[in-house]
Amino acid sequence: MINNLSMDKLTPVQLAELDRKHFLHPTTNPKAHAENGPKAMFSEGKGIYVSEMEGVPYIDGVSMLWNVNIGHGNQEIAEVAKEQMSKLAYSSSFNGFSNEPAVRLAEKLATLAPGNLNSVFFTSGGSESNDTAFKLARFYWELNRKPLKRKIIALGNSYHGVTIAAQTATSIPNFHSFTNSKIKEVFHAKPHLTECERGDKNHPDYEGCIRDIVEKEGADTIAAVIMEPVQGAGGVHIPPEGYMAAVRKLCDDFNILLIADEVITGFGRTGTMFGSENWEAIPDLLCFAKGVTSGYAQLGGVMLSQNVRDTIVEYEEVLSHGFTYSGHATSCAVALKNIEIIERENLVANAKNMEVKLKAGLEYLSEKHKIVTKPRAIGLLSAIDLYQDPANNVPFEEGVMAAAKVWEACFERKLIARPIRFAKGMNTIALAPPLIINNQQIEDVVGILDDAISEFSKSL
Ligand code: PMP
């Protein structure tokens, strides 16, 4: 037992011991963690690198959880947070109270977002944003005297978060079914095929799977379709050209709202400020989080189209929805500075330029290694798949643990990648480095992944 805890006196071993006993980690195997303690204990970050105490830096090849868009250790952000906290760290946004950073950020987001998405409801993160979007969509239809329009359609392979509504919309099996906590009236359409899987550009399986549900359930019962412009945690699935525009059109045809979950794709990740812009499909509600602050503070939100907002502002009673931290002054000040840095440093354009280098690197790996297939990238959101025999579509057996082993071999070589392996035979390795990454650093990333795959291949 360690008494009188004083942070500066704890060794990494002592910290690990406390972690093991007192910290129940998200998305972590609890038994293994309680037995073995943390895999890494980060204490510093600079640019694309993060380090453990006195350790050799790792390249953060996934921007932690695809969110540290401007990279680690940015002192400008630290200064802004300090300044805002010294003045007014936080104030409520309930009952009409407001604060300057929240107002300025709302206005800035209105200028950045595509189309007429020009007002915002702030939350503390991505899951809250998606739950909020579902409620706003239902509320919109109630106000339009269509209270039966309540159902939500999401896509297979989607990840929308872990609050109970967002978890229901998520279709990654373990998250979707965890504790069987679900809301009613959520449906899943088969996912679109990825560009890599399609081959045939004229494949008819566009938005048809969504249409089938609309026709079966009746458009007059459906509030919204939610989709990630590029699916992230579900395996980095870049939709075929025209897919999102086709979903937009389907929603227009059937009088359904389109919700874009831009929690990963917002703020430059795909080489455009928002992912929807890649396909010129403008949603009615746009959910964001992660990159809005690059992880320097907790913040999320839902942007509303003019039409949705116009309907809602006609409501004459209290809008009974809101989070203590909606419009958090320090988080909003951090977001403003983060967006200023993204714009000033041309990080959206850098993401677009680096896509070429990253994709070429992944293509090189797929040519060199027999087991690597489907190299793909959009901006700095990318992945490869590992198959025992890609040419004949033969996946690795479960017991081989291909993605886990390659991920581990990367980690030993000081690259943090992300293994994705929720379905039988699925072995995806995702990379989504900070948007500040340069050519040399991309070569370093690809070089380490190359070595890691070689080591794994030899073990087969
Ligand atoms: N939507 C998407 C597309 C996400 O990737 C995530 C998080 N990975 C979420 C929602 C949930 O966000 P949060 O973890 O901030 O609740």
Image (cartoon, rainbow, N blue to C red):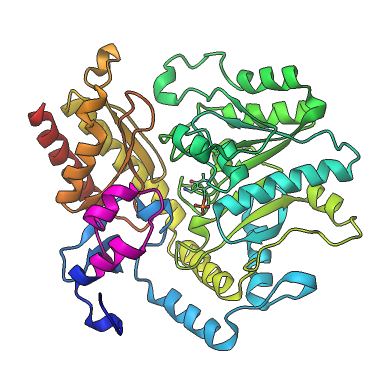
Question: Looking at this rendering, what residue extends furthest in the left direction?
Answer: 458
Quarter of the image where the N terminus is located: bottom left
Inspect this view and state whether residue 47 appears. Answer: no
User: Which residue occupies the foreground of this view, 126 or 249?
Assistant: 126
- Check residue 18 for magenta coloring: yes
User: Which residue occupies the foreground of this view, 54 or 391?
Assistant: 54
Rendered residue at 35%/58% (across/down): 436
Rendered residue at 63%/53% (across/down): 113
Inspect this view and state whether residue 120 appears. Answer: yes
Instruction: From the top left corner, tell me how far across and down residue 410 is, in percent.
Output: 19, 45
Decide: is 150 above or below 114: above
Decide: is 301 above or below 258: below
Instruction: From the top left corner, tell me how far across and down residue 227 is, in percent.
Output: 59, 36
Residue numbers of the magenta segment: 15-42
Residue 22, image quadrant: bottom left
Q: Is residue 150 left or right of residue 410?
A: right
Q: Is residue 387 left or right of residue 324?
A: left
Q: Is residue 171 left or right of residue 245?
A: left
Q: Is residue 288 left or right of residue 393?
A: right
- Check residue 408 for magenta coloring: no
Instruction: From the top left corner, tell me how far across and down residue 281 is, in percent.
Output: 64, 37
Decide: is 358 above or below 291: above
Rendered residue at 21%/47% (across/down): 443
Count every numbered label the image shows and give the total.
Answer: 0
Quarter of the image where the C terminus is located: top left
Rendered residue at 36%/39% (across/down): 382
